[in-house]
Image (tube, rainbow, N blue to C red):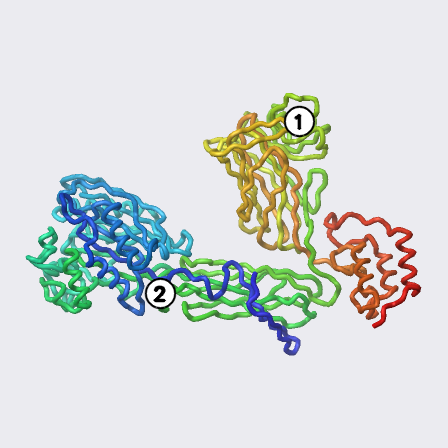
Amino acid sequence: MGHILSEHLMLGGKTKALVLLCAGIAGFFTCFDAYAQLRMVTYNTLTGQAFGGQQTARLPYSSTILEAIGLENVGGISKPIDVLILQEQFSMELSTQSFVDVLNSIYGAGTYARSTINGAVSSFNGGGGRPGLVYNTQSVQLIDELAFGTVGTGDLQPRASLRYQLRPVGYDASADFYVYNNHYRSDNPTSRLIEATSVRNNSDALGEGIHAIYAGDYNVTSSNVGMFQELLSSGNGQAFDPIDTLGVWHDNQFIGPTDIRHVHTQSPAVDGDPIDAEGGADGGLDDRFDFQLVTGEFLDDEGLSYIPGSYRAFGNNGTHNLNDRITSGTGASPTVLSALLNNSDHLPVVADYQLPAKMNAMLASVPTNVMQGASVGIDVFVENIANVLSVNGADELDYTITVGGSLLGSGSGTAFPLAGADMSQIFLDTSSTGFKTGIVTVASSSQQAANPVFNFPVSFTVGGGSGGEVFGVIAKDTFDESLKLNSFSQDPAVGAYSSNGDGFQQYQVGVSSSIPSQLVDDSLNGNPVDVQGMIDTSTKTDAWFGITDTVNGDNLPVSNPGEVTATWEFDVAGAFDMQVSIDMAAMGDFEASGVNGDRFNWTYQIDNGSVLPLFSSTITEDISQTYALADGDMFTLDDPVQMTTTDSEIVTLSNLLQTLTSPIDGLGDLLTIQLTAKTDGGDEAYAFDNLIIEGTTFVEFLAADFNQDGNVDDIDLTKWQMDYALGNGSDADADGDTDGADFLVWQRQYGQSTLPLLASTAAVPEPSGFLLLTLAALVSGSLTRPTR
């Protein structure tokens, strides 16, 4: 948490805190991603020709066009291309890379990258090249790509369909969307229908609610043909035309009373133009061949959605003459129109899409102490921080504010991008005295919203009193003693295994009737030829827990043979900022995969909240570990166990117990910790000890606990000596000064603690006689009091 502004205003008993604390995102109004809305372009670039034809971007025309698309302002949005969906690519390495190079020459090296899969083609002679994709790495990530469809001659599709899974930068998987890139056969309606059916089968299989764009060169003259109707048919992946301009497009200026010249995309050239000589189509603009159809999820104005009015055939504003060059119109500057004329026999199709909302929430600081009955409001700030160029660039943010524990109030609202932060208030429950905790939760219900939940733990004290926060042990199970352990259970139960070589239970040297040999190191305790073990039986005599060979004839449940669990429930009421520490060791050549792959995974749950990872095991097969037994013998084995903590620390376990610590989030009364393990084979073993939960709790301080650490000890005496006669720094009797009377209180309370049981420091011995005599002289006044 970081402080932005620190000031408290006291107004008639009502405290308003102005310290802003940020959780989850560094900086409230900073650290934005690339501009949120996406500019998507599909373009058949006529660069997939074989036998010496054009296979790379035509310069300077391609550069002129792509830069002009980025500069075009539509609906208040002007931005570089985010996704460029290409057709007629000879290969990704040659053709598509050339467009990456063009864009990077405009916007800087490394800004753009490309897809990698070269889909199958039936023949480059007339095959027209493959689909490909270029994307802006600052705004989107390419998560996956897939080539599919049956490619061949005749009625089969001439080139593979490509499906790209993309994710906006700064969002999670819920904001993923799919782009289907197709170049349908030009002369065979049966082939086009077969390909469209394959595409719909694929998108339908993704399930309900998918965000998909069907882009490419459709090679159709009307929306009435079978291929187009297949894309529009009902189902999970049902396609829609964002501009709802359906009918006969070929050689047609009007559909009903509507002039449709602005949707034509082929051909910007006529007979005799340079692109005609390179094998491109001529005849002027008279066809709508190029499309971005979308699923209904893009048309609901929620989350990722098409921005109405942004779909256009680039450079075509409907002013050209039907069947004439693009240069007969006024849809762009003469330079750009000339580039479109000479670059390809198709026009690019551009559309802009809003991204989901992105939430940031902040809580004003909470005062440490408040008076009983006071009205104390705490400001909650919520902002939609999607980094947009205009308000229509991102979805609105719908949110709620709820509280738990010793807090009161709730709130809800809608935050729009570029509108700044909304402010609401919740209140502290000051109806009773004592230490209080609570939690403020800000949650968004907006579709695909980034950072949809913020939790703010809160603690404060109502009433005067002398107390404060102390960090220490709040619960534990050392297998010799426990603290605030409500329950423990294990499955299978102790004694379930018939073999002495199998184990899943608590053990203690000299107490347990038998212990699997792979768990113990007897090299200094009667077995000098011992080659494996973790618990040194010559030194460790307290209890611990061991696991080995759980996959055996005694443990074969149908659901998951060999899996074992151990579960602890601890009382952690009133604690916060908790962490869990466990001493762990492992030795063996473990297996990472397969039905019986080894694993030792710890999870935690607070009350009825989510079950979250605590320590997660990984078997790392590309490294080895050297193990040292107590007698000094060394053994190196492959595939050790590595554990990952909640703060992403990775620890490679050895056969010596070492302490691993994981911070945990949340507040509540009951902490459930569970170990789920599975290990197969007698040469692999895992042991652990001392499950310790630490956290911060509120304690009342004794009068002589001058340094307020929960203990009355020699440190307090030192502080009293320093404060003596200099004020009330060690004023145990609350008379306004530090004097001998305060020492007498310290003497009576010496060695006492208010920390939770076993969380205090070691017992302090009685003060020595010499010390007491010296201090008695001071108390009696024989030592000179410093002048003031």
* Quadrant where the image shows the C terminus: bottom right
Question: Against 255, is 520 above or below?
Answer: above
Residue holding disc 1: 631
Left-right relation of 678 to 216: right
Left-right relation of 61 to 513: left
Q: Position of residue 177 (x, y in %)?
A: 34, 53
Q: Which mark is residue 393?
A: 2
Q: Position of residue 778 (x, y in %)?
A: 90, 62
Label 1 is placed on what type of residue?
Asp
How dense is the environment of label 1, judged by Cα within 10 Å: few (below 14), some, or many (20 and up)? some
| Disc with the residue nearer the chain's start (2 vs 1) | 2
> Rounded to the nearest whole Å, what is the CA distance between mark 2 and mark 1?
68 Å
Q: Looking at the image, which residue is at 74% across and 47% down?
A: 758
How dense is the environment of label 2, judged by Cα within 10 Å: few (below 14), some, or many (20 and up)? many
Evaluate if marks 2 and 1 touch, with contact meaning CB atoms under 8 Å apart: no
- In this rendering, the count of numbered labels is 2
Q: Is residue 777 visible?
A: yes
Residue 66 position by quadrant: bottom left
Q: Looking at the image, which residue is at 69% across and 29% down?
A: 537
Identify the residue at the far left of this view: 272
Q: Which mark is residue 398?
A: none
- Which element is circle 2 on? helix
Left-right relation of 354 to 251: right
Label 2 is placed on what type of residue?
Gly
Question: Against 563, is 306 above or below?
Answer: below
Q: Position of residue 701 (x, y in %)?
A: 76, 59
- Which element is circle 1 on? loop
Residue 73 position by quadrant: bottom left
Q: For the residues carrying marks 2 and 1, which lies nearer the camera in this image?
A: 1
**Of 406 and 251, which appears nearest the observer?**
251
Residue 62 position by quadrant: bottom left
Q: Position of residue 420 (x, y in %)?
A: 45, 70
